[in-house]
Image: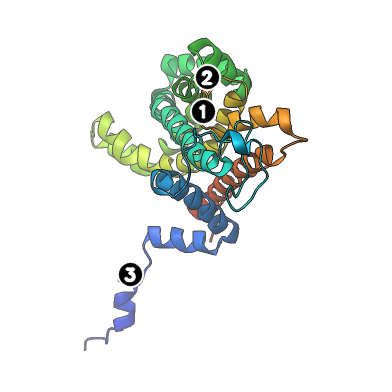
């Protein structure tokens, strides 16, 4: 006699939610992470739509409206030579977000392969990479970025390179630690035992399992890179005038805090909001990608 089969029991494995669906559900329940995502998307959309928005050119001057307070004609007021602050904020978002993304991209592209090599092979390779990483980590992040930017010369491109190099040790150390934990797992040992080439083991088994913490660290580092770019621009080592940048806007605004406080207020608020957005987004991703969270 054949026992009856429960259709629901048979269908249960197929009904299990996919890993990406579970991650999205956990992320969606994280209210602060959703807020961070909204802030990040808002600034990204503003930066992308800057050429198409009905705003004044960021370099256009109006000597009849020098340091004019916010009004219907200039919603965020004007600066010391009559340029529209709102227009410069919107165009400056491009420089800040580009600096954050490109700098972190440089750090990931350089740091992750070096971290994988150090963690997987060990030995003298690990010793050399680790000692160089520790030497770079001994210097504070912003101090190292300022020194590299001053050496390379003042420009947005050089500032992104300097920030990327300064952030690279973070990804080397993180990736190395993750690889050391993953390479002793049973599935990696099994892949090595059946003779799979090292390249395949690294790309199919090691990298996918160390990617989530790297993604979280990259999101959080974008916020740090945006602050670093604003600092370099404030010191004259980043985006060069008359091109708009939030840091360079603050550099000029510091001379007119009493006469035109709006010149400093709006760039400062913009930096605060976009950095807050990336930090909240990174915290939400960390919780959603953590396999220990239920």
Helix, strand or loop at disc 3?
A: helix
Asked whether, in this view, residue 88 is left or right of residue 10, the answer is right
Quadrant in the picture for the N terminus: bottom left
Snapshot quadrant of residue 63: top right
Can residue 290 be seen in this snapshot?
no
Q: Are marks 1 and 2 in contact (CB under 8 Å)?
A: yes
How many numbered callouts?
Answer: 3
The residue sitting at 37% across, 68% down in the picture is 16
Viewer-proximal residue, 60 or 33?
60
What crowding class fits label 2: few (fewer than 14 Cα within 10 Å), some (14-19), or many (20 or more)? Answer: many
Q: Earlier in the sequence, mark 3 or mark 1?
A: 3
Give x and y (percent) for residue 219.
50, 42
Give x and y (percent) for residue 202.
32, 34
Asked whether, in this view, residue 66 is left or right of residue 217, the answer is right
Q: Are marks 3 and 1 in contact (CB under 8 Å)?
A: no
Viewer-proximal residue, 76 or 215?
76
In the rendered view, tell whether residue 265 sits above or below residue 232.
Answer: below
The residue sitting at 45% across, 35% down in the picture is 98
What crowding class fits label 3: few (fewer than 14 Cα within 10 Å), some (14-19), or many (20 or more)? Answer: few
The residue sitting at 43% across, 14% down in the picture is 124
Q: Earlier in the sequence, mark 1 or mark 2?
A: 2
Q: Earlier in the sequence, mark 2 or mark 3?
A: 3
- The numbered mark at residue 173 is 1
Helix, strand or loop at disc 2?
A: helix
Helix, strand or loop at disc 1?
A: helix
- The numbered mark at residue 133 is 2
Comparing marks 3 and 1, which lies closer to the viewer? 1
* Spatial CA span between label 1 and label 2: 7 Å
**Residue ID for mark 3:** 13
Give x and y (percent) for residue 93.
50, 40
* Spatial CA span between label 3 and label 1: 38 Å
């Amino acid at each position: 006699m054949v026992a009856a089969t429960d259709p629901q029991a048979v269908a249960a494995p197929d009904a299990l939610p996919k890993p990406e669906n579970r991650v999205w559900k956990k992320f969606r329940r994280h209210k602060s992470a959703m807020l961070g995502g909204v802030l990040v998307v808002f600034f990204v959309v503003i930066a992308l739509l800057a050429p198409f928005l009905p705003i004044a050119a960021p370099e256009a001057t109006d000597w009849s409206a020098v340091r004019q307070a916010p009004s219907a004609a200039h919603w965020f007021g004007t600066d010391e030579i009559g340029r529209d602050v709102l227009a410069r904020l919107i165009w400056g978002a491009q420089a800040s977000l580009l600096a954050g993304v490109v700098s972190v991209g440089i750090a990931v592209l350089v740091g992750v392969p070096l971290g994988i090599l150090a963690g997987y092979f060990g030995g003298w390779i690990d010793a050399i990479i680790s000692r160089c990483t520790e030497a770079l980590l001994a210097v504070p992040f912003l101090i190292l970025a300022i020194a590299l930017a001053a050496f390379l010369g003042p420009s947005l491109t050089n500032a992104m390179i300097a920030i990327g190099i300064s952030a690279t040790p973070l990804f080397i150390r993180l990736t190395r630690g993750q690889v050391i934990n993953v390479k002793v797992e049973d599935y990696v040992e099994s892949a090595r035992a059946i003779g799979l080439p090292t390249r395949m083991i690294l790309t199919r088994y090691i990298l996918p399992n160390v990617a989530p913490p790297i993604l979280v660290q990259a999101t959080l580092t974008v916020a740090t890179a945006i602050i670093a770019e604003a600092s370099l621009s404030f010191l004259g080592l980043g985006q060069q005038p008359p091109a708009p940048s939030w840091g360079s806007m603050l550099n000029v605004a510091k001379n007119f805090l009493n006469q035109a406080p709006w010149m400093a207020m709006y760039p400062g608020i913009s930096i605060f909001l976009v950095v807050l957005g990336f930090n909240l987004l990174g915290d939400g991703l960390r919780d959603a990608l953590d396999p220990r969270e239920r």
